[in-house]
Amino acid sequence: MIIGVLALQGDTREHLHALAELDVIARPVRRPDELDSVDALIIPGGESTAMSKLAIEFGMTEPLRKRIGGGMPTYGSCAGMIMLAGSILDGRADQVPFGGIDMTVRRNAFGRQVDSFEGTVDISDIDGGPFSAVFIRAPWVEEVGPDVRVLGRVSGRSGPSGEAARAGLSTGSAAGRIVAVRQQHLLATAFHPELTGDLRVHRYFVEMAREAGQTTEG
Ligand SMILES: NC(=O)CC[C@H](N)C(=O)O
């Protein structure tokens, strides 16, 4: 099994590194023929408006829509979550998501004054305690359709910076927000597990990809 990491823009390297730590064969994907050669895909964090523009320029939008819609296991973190959404609030008018997950996300949702903060997130399918999750100009999920499972919400604050408090975690405006979802073969988180060295989300996704591979092969 080969897992690709979309390499148009964003923190591709960090995801490749996380996959290498898990002994998975992983490679960057920029062109349609490279997409053809992978079994699953990670869409990294970065800037979704730039990613959308580059995907159009590289002729990747339609091939990606087709593979994602056709059952390729795909995981999006942060900007990648935005690109997997059916609909985007506070996006740019010319921004075209790849879609796949029946959800509405709000870009830069935690407030413009807060560029980044750490929060805690419990993910229902993943053992080992809450995640210390890094949010960088992150979206949250505003609404989900009936086929989407909510896996995680912001449960509290962590980290010494007090940024989480400014993000409203103490007053409750960020607490409880949906930041991890799954719809069948598609997974998305608003935070960046690739930046914290906690490999549990990647391990979970690799398992998803393996299971999908077994179903198609057998
Ligand atoms: N860290 C991120 O991926 C930020 C996402 C960014 N705010 C966007 O709209 O794409």
Image: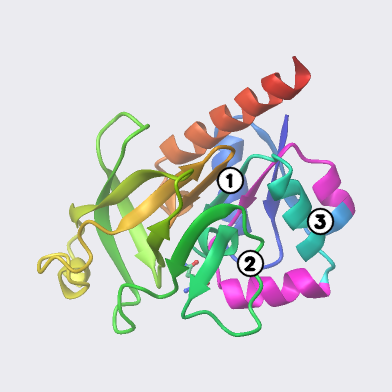
- Which quadrant holds residue 122? top left
Say which residue label 3 marks.
63
Q: Quadrant of the N terminus?
A: top right
Say which residue label 2 marks.
97
Task: Give whichever of discs 1 and 3 has the lower sequence position.
Answer: 1
Tell which tag, 1 or 3, sits nearer the viewer: 3
In this rendering, would 213 be left or right of 31?
left
Asked which secondary structure carries label 1, the reply is helix
Q: For the view shown, which residue lies furthest in the left direction? A: 171
Task: Give yes or no for contact between labels 2 and 3 (Cβ–Cβ under 8 Å).
Answer: no
Say which residue label 1 marks.
17
Bounds of the magenta span? 33-57
Q: Is residue 39 magenta?
A: yes
Q: For the view shown, which residue lies furthest in the right direction? A: 33
Task: Give yes or no for contact between labels 1 and 3 (Cβ–Cβ under 8 Å).
Answer: no
- Decide: few, some or many residues near mark 3? Use Cα within 10 Å; few <14, some 14-19, many ≥20: some
- Which quadrant holds residue 96? bottom right
Picture residue at 58% right of the left edge, 45% below the top? 17
In this rendering, would 43 be left or right of 117?
right
